[in-house]
Every structure is written in C-alpha cells, then in structure tokens.
Image (tube, helix red, strand yellow):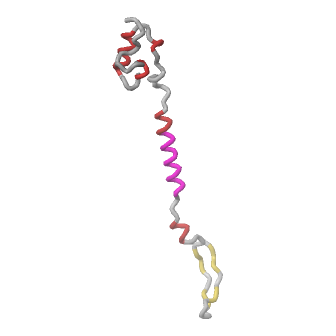
Amino acid sequence: MGYRKGYYKKDGTYVQGHYVDSRSKKFYSKKSKGGCLTTMLLLILFVFISCTDDDSDCSSKTCSDFTTQSEAQSLFDSDRSCYENLDADNDNIACENLSN
C-alpha cells in the first residue's frame, strides 16, 4: 500500500490522492511454475533413487557364491528374471558346472 499523489486527467479535472495497492494486477495473475517444477524434479529424483536400491543382491550373485548346483537352482527358481545371470545358456538350469 502506498499513497498516490493527486494528478490531472486529460480532460483537465483534478483527482485527489489516495491510498492504493502498489502491486499491479499482473502480480496476482502470474502463476508460479517454479514450485510445480521443483516438485516434479524431486519426485523424479526420489523414483530414480528408489529404483537404484543397493539392498538387492539380484545381479551380484554368481555361480561362485554357491557350493552346490541345487542351492543355485533353488535361488534361480525363486526369481528367474532377477537371477538370470546364473543360467548362462538359457536352459533354466542354474550353474551347471557345480556339483549337486
């Protein structure tokens, strides 16, 4: 809020000064896109971080982590898409080079 000094209109009439809102209407009509953009970026970052979870040891298991083929096979059968690296020739038999 501020005080506007009196002024003359084009037709020569004088207008008294009065208190006015110093912010323009454009100030109110602008929509803040920064908050929405920031929220979207944080959401994408959260999804990316949650998808790259290091607690999962799916792809880190190799045949050398097992002593017998039956151990490897039971883990492979529990989640074939996760432990697909245990089956090199894609015949659904995990770690064929290990003994039973």
**Residue 50 position in % (x across, y down):** 47, 35
Residue at left offset 63%, top offset 89%: 8
Residue toward you, 87 or 73: 87
Residue 85's place in the image compared with 17, above or below, is: above
Tell whether position 28 is magenta. no
Q: Splitting the image into 4 quarters, where does residue 85 fall?
A: top left
Residue 73's place in the image compared with 31, above or below, is: above
Q: Residue furthest top?
A: 99
Q: Residue furthest bottom?
A: 12
8 with respect to 84 (left or right): right
Determine the main secondary structure of the stretch shown in magenta.
helix
**Residue 15 position in % (x across, y down):** 60, 87
**Residue 99 position in % (x across, y down):** 40, 5
Magenta highlight range: 33-46
Residue at left offset 37%, top offset 21%: 90
Residue 20's place in the image compared with 70, above or below, is: below
Residue toward you, 59 or 87: 87
Tell whether position 44 is magenta. yes
